Amino acid sequence: MNNSIFELKDIFLDYVDPRLGKFNALENINLSIKSGEYVSLVGPSGSGKTSLANILGLLVSPTRGKIFYSGRSISDLSESERIDIRGAEIGFIFQDYVLIEYLTVLENVALTLSYQKISRKEALDRAALELNRLGLSQKLHHLPKQLSGGQKQRVAIARALLRKPKVILADEPTGALDQQSRYEVLSILQDLNASGMTIVTVTHSEEDATASKRIIRIEQGKIVDDHLQRNSNRFFGKVVIEDKVLLSERVKAALSYVNLNFGVKNIDDFFLESNKITFSLDKISLLKQFRPHWISDLKAQDILLEWIKSEDDFIVMMTCLVILKSPIEMSYSSSRFNDFKKFFQSTWTEEAALMFFKEFHQISESKMSGLLNPLNLINHKSPRVRASAVILFKYKELWNSESEIVKGLKDLLLCDDDRVISNTLDFLLLNPYLGEGELKKMNIPFEISPRAKASWCRLLISWGNISEAKKILSPMLESSFEKEVAAAVWVMAREDSFNLHSYIHEKLNQQPEFIGHLDSMIGAYKRSLETE
């Protein structure tokens, strides 16, 4: 399947100069750009790279040749149809920002919606939202002359993103910026590309081109080189677009950049929503020094000891993982080792501990047993951390006895946090440290939430108590509370003891009006899968 967003075939672009006469700005250009690519058009001034970008942006028609956009022949479209595509699907960013000096930042961005049939208030509201995402909430009512170059370019990016385009065309977007502002713009473009947006930039900067995944070099109107970059350079600025997907991509890129890619596929909400986690150049520079061999340096160990006492949860977690994943075994008798052990056992905050548990399974057993005692976490003030600590049963040598595990599990089952109860019940489903009789005597408050009730039902089913599980699930299935329905369907869809289709068929035979409840039941289940 061809997923090209741009396809250019035998493109020529001729200009007539009053003094020089006719000349070819572009000559015999054949080019395909796939959806989701990040491409840099590189070349010296006058090479034709901007002319090529103008053709891609449907701003200029070639003298001859064919252009296809998303499989549609542009030559077959009217001018108004081209304008519609430009307006809805292509966002433009220019070197000189193209901001109207007498309009405020907010008005400049909202102006791009002026041709749409929406109220001025709605246009301003949408513009404000986009500017806020780019960290410009304090600049909405400033004039362009009151902004720095980097801030102006972020305004231009907000304007380009307002209509949610498929493609961003950026002509020398960093040409007038200082180094810090350049990094800001490049990192935002990389974030947008990581989320699936197609990016095409025009640049004469070789460094800027390394941000892309493909470089097309143009000289005297011809493509002289076109190659993919296996290892593009990742840039990091202080500004992160306030978007969960984009922030997730920035986090993964940062971890990969410092050679500490833990295989993170989905970043938990607590990670993404933490106000403490920011990715500045300073922090990336700091993390860049985390290398496996680094731990063997005594001076480095002293620095790590300072970092592990940081108030920044992210730094605490990263420092712990670096120490634990290092292939170098520190002497357990050393004073530094004892210092590390002391801080491992005392400095955890909830976020740092949860982030650590997300990755702990990749750490060597000897390192874990030497530095971390789960009993220090089983008594943590956070029920979620206590629940996470239980999974350290994998390293049985860390526990003095199995009775400590049982004691920890009972404590978790009687707390008032439904997520902890549910997670602990799910843990017991696979690791039966507590039997049916003992659990039933405990009067576990599983009715605290639909999620906890669902986990309790799965345990009942594993014990063969199908009828008892049905007594709990039946009213949940017919509840008007969406989460109750979703939790019940979630159990039935996963347990062989229940045939969900047979249950629905039986209910419809008994109660034809049940059809009205069926749509909401399946809808609730689908939404529960999306948020798992």
Image (cartoon, grey):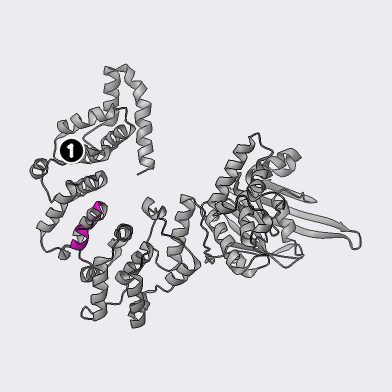
Above or below, comparing residue 479 to residue 141 in the picture:
above
Say whether residue 462 is left or right of residue 219: left
Residue 213 visible at all? no
**Residue 439: horizontal and vertical position, in percent?**
11, 44
Q: Which amino acid type corresponds to the residue marked 1 in the rendered image? A: Ile
**Residue 98: horizontal and vertical position, in percent?**
71, 54
Q: Nearer the viewer, residue 178 or 374?
A: 178
Above or below, comparing residue 309 to residue 509 in the picture:
below
Q: At 65% across and 68% down in the image, what residue appears?
A: 205
Quarter holding the C terminus is top left
Q: Nearer the viewer, residue 77 or 478?
A: 478
Residue 20 visible at all? yes
Q: At 23% across and 37% down in the image, what residue appears?
A: 496
Q: At 76% across and 62% down in the image, what residue appears?
A: 221
Q: Nearer the viewer, residue 118 or 450?
A: 118
**Residue 415: horizontal and vertical position, in percent?**
19, 47
